[in-house]
Amino acid sequence: MESQDLDLLIIDMWDLIVAAAAAAVAAGTTAAAMYIDAKTGIGADIAALRGFRKGGKIWEEAVKQKQTSLYYLWEESALLRGNDECIWSREGCYTWTQAYDRVHQYAQWFLSQGVRPKDLVGVYLQNSPDFMLIWIALWSLGAAPALINYNLAGEALVHCLKISGSTLLLVDSDEALQARINESKSAIEGELNMRCVNLEDAKSVVVTLPAQRPGNELRDNVKGSDPMCLLYTSGTTGLPKGCQFNTDRMHMVCSQRKAGTGRTVPSDRWYDCMPFYHGTGGCAALNVLCNGVTLCVGKKFSTSNFWIEVRDSRSTWITYVGETARYLLAAPPSPLDLQNEVRGMSGNGLRPDVWIKFRDRFGITEIVEFFNSTEGVFGLVNYCRGDYLATSVGHHGILRRRLLQNTFVPVRVDTGTGDLLRDSKTGFAIREPYDVGGEMLVAVPSEKAFQGYHNNPGATEKKFIRDVFKKGDLWYRSGDALRRTDDGRWFFLDRLGDTFRWKGENVSTAEVSEVIGRFPGVVEANVYGVQLPNHDGRAGCAAIYIDPAVRGTFDYAALLQHTRTRLPKYAVPIFLRIVENMTPIHNNKQNKVPLREEGIDPAKVYKGDEIVWAEAGAKTYQPFTESHWDSLNSGKARL
């Protein structure tokens, strides 16, 4: 029996169990039924499992009809919605019919450029309606885009293009992007044999071409394992790695929403200004379009323009990533804060210390926080209304907890080496209780469960580990540490490599960051461990951005007391780095790597930043000077 068939059988059995439970509850009161459902999460479990089953059936039918290409989901929406608005943007708007025609014009242009089924085409583009239309046009040919981060230049840019194996690169007409491409053009065109085409030049031809729908034969051989796009990891610890986002995975995401698990209705309008080359921004936009919902395109994230565009576009949902909510909260309160039509927001990385503040200030009814990675093997989702599930990254009711108890497993890890800790007698990994948490491992039947890093078998192999709980078993390493409460709420602990060890104890950077982030005047806290001369482990350091309005009167003594009363002694940061600017990378997520590398050495720290520290027994943070650094180096100062 196939694993998917087994899953469907289990779901069918549970449907019967729940039906029986519902009948029993019916003998009581509605209030009792609601209480039982809230306590056990059965209702949410059944909705999720039924959605998975329905999505699976939609996929099975697509396979039978040779309509596995995601183009068909988009086409169904386009033909259904007709003259309704499909895409809104400052650059111009499209009805579904207009978008349908433009997709086919782009498809004809790609055919004229030699693009064929299974090809990857490089795109180095900012957000725009054309970005989406180009993506779907490639699907219509059985091809897919390689999504290049347009902030990349030099070696990293050439590296990503080389991984893709593309022979064609579409480049945004923006001057800065053109300049970055031109700097590496000899390598791109010479070494990689890749043609660079300015998007504006291509568009001038595209608009003259017939809007002829490509024949079905171009899509007949699209397999579930084929990429619907090539994504890249963020590359904060080295050169980015390519990850193909498989067609069947995205088809399931879209089909489950089509089956009713989504929270949208056709009249919704979805604002997305997160970068489309990033998994969250791009896939959210495609999911919307494949389900007949209007997409409102923001060119890029801007604190000052965000709510203006949301109001002007009449958006009812928004996409967020990382610290987006924190940056919007940092703006001065305005009478316009509640003057929006936004009902819900969806994304990942919403931090606990800003969750409720953001929700209440801007009047958001529903938050859909999901936890996943570019690799996409371990995923969670939290459909949150109210306070009960607030700040968690996912929720499993009693049924899914039972089903997945030996599929998602937390284990103990050596934070210094990153290796799994093993029992000295058995040689097997040490399983942690769910409420304690650890790095999450995912049981997989074979290495095919992870599509792998594109053209990088060495990196792919490192994601798997064997002989974990018994000889011959195979597990996928997520690289993320999480814990799950007894009632099924999942909470993020840390990214493997971010957790550090101090005074013989493990320190969670996420936990410390949350505590500091709740202190008045702290807009952002980015926590990491720094190496010190003559000391084992890493000492805690927090790069904090203080609200400019209170920077001159900021109470460091109160902050120190705040952390000491809320954190274990070993987790209280010894050092603070007062930064002039916040520390996001291109996708609004924090970057610890350069901060960790600079440490607290005054000769390395950016001159605009200030380091302060709290010696043992100190009542406040004081400036950290060259003489203090010398004392640490000479061994005179001990912490």
Image: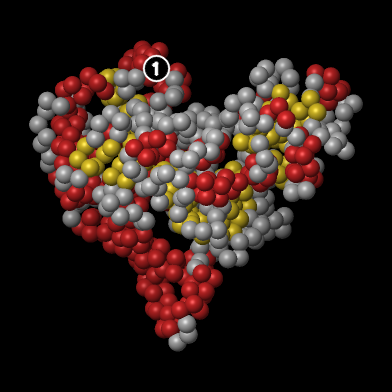
Q: Is residue 509 visible?
A: no
For numbered disc 1, what is the local secondary structure? helix
Identity of the amino acid at label 1? Ala
What is the quadrant of the C terminus in the image? top right
Q: Say left or right for 8 vs 198.
A: right
Where is the N terminus found, in terms of image quarters? Answer: bottom left
Q: Please, which colouring scheme is shown? A: secondary structure
Q: Nearer the viewer, residue 200 or 9?
A: 200
Q: Position of residue 117 (x, y in %)?
A: 22, 37
Q: Position of residue 596 (x, y in %)?
A: 66, 30
Residue at 68% from the left image edge and 45% from the top image edge: 515
- Can residue 153 be seen from the camera position used here? yes
| Relative side of 379 to 134, left or right | right
The image quadrant of residue 121 is top left
- Residue pictured at 16% horizontal, 41% vertical: 97
Residue name at image x 56 percent, y 47 percent: 357
Q: Nearer the viewer, residue 34 or 16?
A: 34
Look at the picture and state if 155 lies above or below 3: above
Count of all numbered marks drawn on residues in the image: 1
Label 1 crowd bin: few (<14), some (14–19), many (20+), radius 10 Å: few
Task: Examine the image and state in which quarter residue 172 appears.
Answer: top left
Name the residue at the front extreme. 335
Residue placed farthest to the bottom in the image?
A: 27
Position of residue 93 measured from the top left corner of the image (x, y, whole percent): 24, 35
> Is 13 located above or below residue 232 in the figure?
below
Q: Which residue lies at the image location 26% right of the left edge and 39% below the top edge? A: 87
Coordinates of residue 31 in the picture (x, y in percent):
49, 77
- Nearer to us in this view, 27 or 371: 27
**Residue bearing mark 1:** 176
